[in-house]
Image: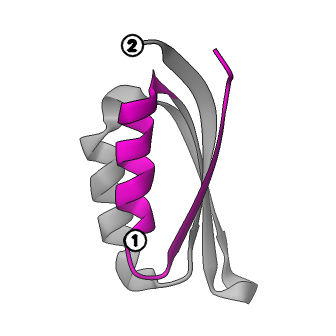
Amino acid sequence: MNKRIGVVAILVEDRDSVGGVNKLLSTHAEIVVGRMGIPYKEKNLSVISIIVDGTNDEIGALTGRLGRLQGVTVKSALTQK
């Protein structure tokens, strides 16, 4: 299966879900190229961006699991090839 490169944006509005987000990112570490996280204290929000390199199935598994966490919103943009 072809690999794709992309960026995944994660917005964490429920601080209780931060542990779950970190656990999932560790579980899928083989497709994570880089990560940047910024706490936005004024809005009580954490913003995490991840660069990924994996198959559609691998990236979809990660984003699907992240999106099922309480108070977590996930969006992704991937290369076409």
At which x and y percent is residue 72? 50, 73
At which x and y percent is residue 23? 27, 56
Q: CA distance from mark 1 to mark 2?
A: 31 Å
Would you place residue 76 above or below residue 42 in this image?
A: above
| Quarter residue 65 falls in | bottom left
| Three-letter code for the amino acid on which mark 1 is drawn | Val
Question: Which segment did they paint magenta?
Answer: 53-81
Give me the disc on residue 1.
2
The residue singled out by tag 1 in the image is 18
At which x and y percent is residue 52? 52, 31
Quadrant location, the N terminus: top left
Left-right relation of 73 to 62: right
Would you place residue 22 above or below residue 31 in this image?
A: below
| Quarter residue 26 falls in | top left
Secondary structure beneath label 1: helix
Magenta stretch: includes residue 42: no
Q: Are marks 1 and 2 in contact (CB under 8 Å)?
A: no
Secondary structure beneath label 2: loop
Residue found 67% across the figure and 82% down from its top:
41
Quadrant location, the C terminus: top right
| Three-letter code for the amino acid on which mark 2 is drawn | Met
Magenta stretch: includes residue 63: yes
